[in-house]
Amino acid sequence: MLQLLLLAVTSAVFYVYHGGFQAASVWGGGVIAMTHTLLLAWRRSGADSGRVLSGAESLRLLYRTALERFVLVALLFALALGVLKLDPLALIAGFITGQLALVAGFKRTD
């Protein structure tokens, strides 16, 4: 929810100063950040609900998830910039806003 709220505010600011296309591009960056968050949540729930992993298995899962995240974000940026032709500055602003919401909303579960 925090991601959506911050994206709405950022999109509104871009709309006021730059117009509708840039505001939509902010949402494009936000969708990339939210997709990234969903991948992390999916991998975490799978790791939490599965059997206990050894140290080597946990490390392999960590590296695999990091690679998946990198590839997913790179492909979505390529799609947004190459195919959809979204505004680069607004796209990155939306992505950063979404990522900041992820960091700000992080809660320890120890």
Image (spheres, rainbow, N blue to C red):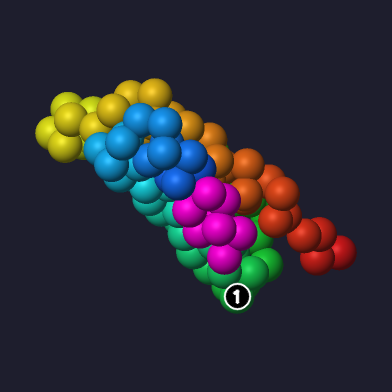
54 displayed left or right of 67? right
Which residue bears the numbered disc 1? Answer: 49
Q: Which residues are magenta?
A: 1-9
Rendering coords of residue 79 (x, y %)? 21, 36
Q: Nearer the viewer, residue 40 or 29?
A: 29
Residue 98 appears in the picture as rendered? yes
73 displayed left or right of 97? left
Q: Residue furthest left?
A: 83
> What secondary structure predominates along the stretch shown in magenta?
helix
Q: Nearer the viewer, residue 11 or 82?
A: 11
Q: Residue furthest top?
A: 89
Q: Nearer the viewer, residue 110 or 12?
A: 12
Rendering coords of residue 109 (x, y %)? 80, 65
* Residue at horizontal 68 percent and vertical 46 percent from the top: 103
Q: Secondary structure at mark 1?
A: helix
Residue 41 quadrant: bottom right
What type is the residue that disc 1 sits on? Ser
